[in-house]
Amino acid sequence: MKLGLRKFGLVFFSFLISSNFFWFNPPIIRNQNELFSTQKTISLNINSNTYLTNISPEIDRWVKEKISNLTLEEKVDQMFIFRAVGNVMTSDFENFLKSTKPGGFIFLGENISDSKEFTKKISETNPNLPYFFAVDEEGGEVKRFDADKNPGAKVLDKYGAEDFCKEYEKTTEIIKENGMNLNFGVIADIAWDNKSFIYSRAFSNNPSDVAEKVRLQIKCSKAALTTVKHFPGHGRTSTDSHKTIPVINISYNDWKNSDAIPFQESLKEFPDMVMIGHLKYPKIDNTPATLSKIQIENLRKMGFDGVVITDDMQMLSNSGMNPEDALFKAFDAGNDILLYVTYLIKPEDMIQKIVDRVRKGQISEDRINKSVERILRLKFRL
């Protein structure tokens, strides 16, 4: 009888595991030492199919139809966002758009005048696919619209959930009213270093608090697509990544216990994009995260199957990196979109360099297709 109960218990336990009864998944193990570690770690365990299960047959059909009608050049076009030129449509800019139709444009202050009319004119140059019209509208010291009174993360961190949400609802409505559809505005960095240029833009130095606020911000920002930044975390360094590449010397386990938490938690609200920072974590990978297959794979293992976008690629050139090397390495690392606020290589030449590498077999067209599929899933909603 005892033997029968034991067999029954083993069979029943096996059934529970195979049927996904348990709510948790085992943590990702990077090496055998972690398997025996007694240190408490967060588990980067969101189901990697989370995003895919949200794709309706209608979206899937639309994406497949669109991608089947794109040339290789047009697919690669989709993988770039460039700075908008001026604040009104000119003949030169219109001529550029007749031959090159990038995935979208980022608008800074001087690009915003009658931006709703400007984005309308840009849209008319490509009736087959919408553009991303992006803006950095964080609130506080980083915003492009005078009408946005959002006081920024440090102030809003002290607000209750209802008032907090109202501010971000208003912010994204202003973005929408001005012709934009994508905000690079969700700061998931933790304010560890009060000398950091990111310090005043981050919610606090408490990972759980930052995670809670980031989730709420995404949830309350539905009028525009959302971008969480700067993965894997910018808050530990006082070095400005616009000028040089910061080096952050923490281990993978320490990162999982701290800076990873807001990014991990943000995925529960389905952010549309995650922006990768020009940040070097040498104990994880001795290359800037934007150019790191390991860092992007870490993000994917957390369960994110949305669009991965770089921070401004020109920042790498400011650090002394050859712009062509940075271009190729960013593609090889697995980024879906490369963002260029400024550039040393002409946009059309950058696109052609990637097209040439595909034709030479140095980049597979399947790799391009996977990124373009992610991009088009978002564009279905625009």
Image (cartoon, rainbow, N blue to C red):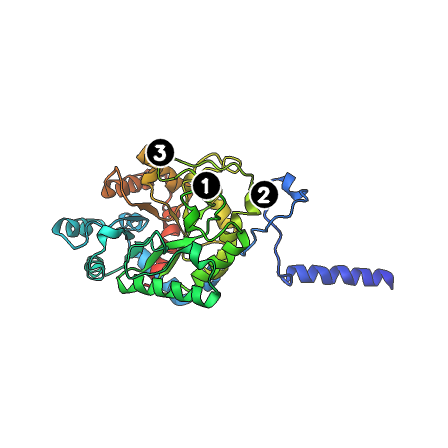
Residue found 46% across the figure and 37% down from its top? 280
Q: Measured from the top left, where is residue 163 in percent x and y?
A: 43, 66
* Residue bearing mark 3: 319
**Mark 3 and mark 1 residues within 8 Å of each other at the beta carbon:** no
Residue found 38% across the figure and 37% down from its top? 329
Q: Is residue 321 above or below residue 216?
A: above
Q: Nearer the viewer, residue 308 or 204?
A: 204
Q: CA distance from mark 2 to mark 1?
A: 18 Å
Q: Measured from the top left, where is residue 78 in percent x and y?
A: 30, 51
Identity of the amino acid at label 3? Ser
Q: Nearer the viewer, residue 10 or 242?
A: 242
Q: Measured from the top left, where is residue 313 in percent x and y?
A: 33, 41
**Labels 2, 1: front one:** 2
Image quadrant in which the C terminus is located: bottom left
Q: How many marks?
A: 3
* Residue bearing mark 1: 293
Q: Is residue 325 above or below residue 259?
A: above
Identity of the amino acid at label 1? Lys
Q: Residue furthest toward the right? A: 1
Residue found 40% across the figure and 36% down from its top? 245
Instruction: Say which element carries label 3.
Output: loop
Name the side, left or right, on which 118 lies relative to 239. left
Which mark, residue 253?
2
Badge 1 density bin: few <14, some 14–19, many ≥20, Cα 10 Å: many
Which mark, residue 92?
none
Q: Is residue 48 visible?
A: no
Question: Mark 3 or 1 closer to N-term?
Answer: 1
Q: Measured from the top left, where is residue 23 in percent x and y?
A: 62, 61
Instruction: Say which element carries label 1.
Output: helix
Q: CA distance from mark 2 to mark 3?
A: 28 Å
